[in-house]
Image: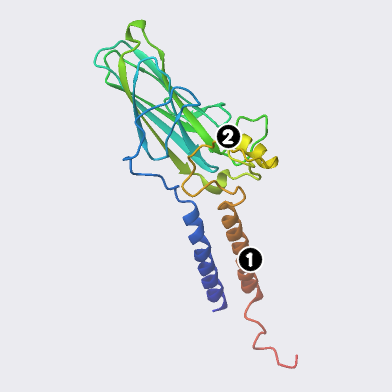
Amino acid sequence: MRITRVLSVALLMLGLAVTPAVADTSPSPSASDDGGAPTLAGTSFRTATEIEQGQTATASASTGDYLYWSFPADAGLRPTVRATVKLPDTHAAETWQIDVYDGLRRRQACQYGAQTRTAAANAGTVELTCVLRTVRGWSEPWANDPLPGTYYIRLTVVDVPTSDLGLPVGAEVRVDSKDIGGSAAVDGTLAEPLVPGAAVKSQDDAESSSASAVLSSIEPEDGWASGWWSDRWVWTAIGGALAALAGVAGYALTRGPGRPSRVPPGA
């Protein structure tokens, strides 16, 4: 009976502990309404069109143009960038490429996905995908790890005959992220996310100046992460609780029923 009670308490505590952990590891919310999605693309890093994750941005351009978009990515997320280029009815073979840069304008390598693709002559569309590494809350200065802040997308053709330059094309870009959770958590956090104007704003605050920097207007829906909390703390607490309950159950099993009935009370 004692063992049954111990196991019941263990299952109850495990259920209460797992509930917040499951909630914390759910995918991050993203905008699903594309009614306000941008229909233009920038032509440089400074003029990159801001988009929210979950939106499908579109743009009309000419073959040979450089198209730029920017989006926010927070710690613990693994962004996936998808681009579709609608080609003209008649064209030669073309090679298109999508590149992703972080807030320091460092080109980020794709974990997997077709970052560069060649469209056959007269093909209707070409689709590109880049799955980035998980965004880290902190990194060594010499490392090239993706950090929280603004990310830039650059879409362009890298191999095209001169006769096809200037032909009209259409582009669609979409960014979605998977919440990796505590398995990708690291100790430490940035003082500020890497967004345009953050460094200038910090300097102005230190000098108590009235000047203000123009910051990027996009950020995650629930704000930037504080950097110290992750579901790793929940699973650590679960492990500690299970270890304590295992000790109690082991003690109950090895203790036995108590004083044998055949031993006289005065012995």
- Kindly identify the amino acid type of the residue bearing the numbered disc 1: Ala
Residue 214, how many percent across, how many down?
54, 36
Give me the disc on residue 244. 1
Q: Residue at x 62, y 34 (%)?
A: 200
Q: Residue at x 70, y 40 (%)?
A: 207
- Please, which residue is most extreme toward the right here? 267
Q: CA distance from mark 2 to mark 1?
A: 50 Å
Say which of 256 and 67 sits in front: 67
Say which of 204 and 60 sits in front: 204
Residue 219, how many percent across, how many down?
49, 42
Structural crowding at the residue carrying mark 1, measured as other residues with C-alpha within 10 Å and reported as few (<14), some (14–19) or many (≥20): few
| Above-or-below relation of 219 to 49 | below
| Above-or-below relation of 70 to 1 | above
- Please, which residue is most extreme toward the left here? 89
Residue 148, how many percent across, how many down?
56, 39
- Please, which residue is most extreme toward the top here? 162
| Above-or-below relation of 139 to 30 | above
Structural crowding at the residue carrying mark 2, measured as other residues with C-alpha within 10 Å and reported as few (<14), some (14–19) or many (≥20): few
| Above-or-below relation of 244 to 181 | below
Give me the disc on residue 197. 2
Q: Residue at x 60, y 67 (%)?
A: 245
The image quadrant of residue 171 is top left
- Kindly identify the amino acid type of the residue bearing the numbered disc 2: Gly
Question: Circle 2 sits in a helix, a strand or a loop, which is it?
Answer: loop
